Image (cartoon, helix red, strand yellow):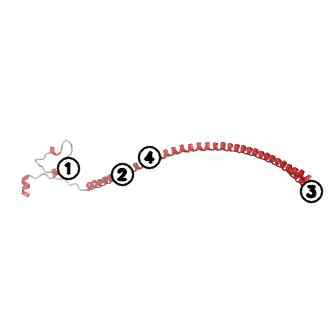
Amino acid sequence: MWLALIGSVIAAAIAGFGGSWLLPVGLTLTVAGGVLAAVFAWREVKITRNTLLAEQARDAQRASELLREATRLNLGVVTVLSARNNELVRELGISRAATAELQRDAAALRGDKAALAAELTQRTAELEQVRTSLTDVKALLDADVVALPVVNDSASTEVDLWTEDGYPTVVLLEALANPPAPETEERKHA
């Protein structure tokens, strides 16, 4: 292309310094050189274009292969991560179930603790009552024993006091210690 252009410029320059008959020949050579240069330029553009398209196709092919390989690797990673995620979800479910069971056991233990605290309070109160009773019994044991006077009352008999159930009751003992006064005596006092 460059040769055709340079050749036509030289031929046009020679024709310009020549006679009148060389002028149309120089003009023809210049136009022919331009057309020839244009044909060569278009051919070079076509070759360059085809070369670039081939390189683009090769680059696209390489990019496609790299993308396919990356996709395959990423799919492997996604598969591994999905399996691990499923395992973690399963372990989370087991942990939640264990947590719920432990919370239920803790609630039961808190209830048992409250019941035991209430029972301890009740038993402590009962123990205090027993201690008080023991103090009263000890005081009674340390007290001087005085014989009660026996009054022969014709209305009360031994059979009345000592029944088949066993010893006489406190009410009967009080009646024995303080026999009822005959009505005549009550009137005297009044």
Q: Earlier in the sequence, mark 3 or mark 4?
A: 3
- Secondary structure at badge 1 equals helix
The answer, for residue 28, to whether it is visible in the render is yes
The answer for how far apart the CA atoms under marks 2 and 3 are is: 134 Å
For residue 65, side relative to residue 168 (left or right): right
Whether the residues at callouts 3 and 4 have beta carbons within 8 Å, the answer is: no
User: Crowding near pointer 2: few (<14 within 10 Å), some, many (20+)?
Assistant: few
Residue at position x 59%, y 43% in the image: 82
Q: Is residue 132 above or below residue 57?
A: below
The residue under label 2 is which amino acid type? Ala
Residue underneath mark 1: 170
Q: Position of residue 23 (x, y in %)?
A: 90, 53
Image height of 7 relative to 69, above or below: below
Q: Nearer the viewer, residue 185 or 30?
A: 30
The percent coordinates of residue 153 (x first, y second) are 11, 49
Q: Earlier in the sequence, mark 2 or mark 3?
A: 3
Which mark is in front, 1 or 4? 4
User: Mark 3 and mark 1: span between their CA atoms?
Assistant: 170 Å
Disc 2/disc 1 C-alpha distance (Å): 35 Å
The residue at which mark 3 appears reads as 17
The image's mark for residue 104 is 4
Contact (Cβ within 8 Å) of mark 2 with mark 1: no
Q: Position of residue 156 (x, y in %)?
A: 13, 47
Q: For marks 3 and 4, give the one nearer the viewer.
A: 3
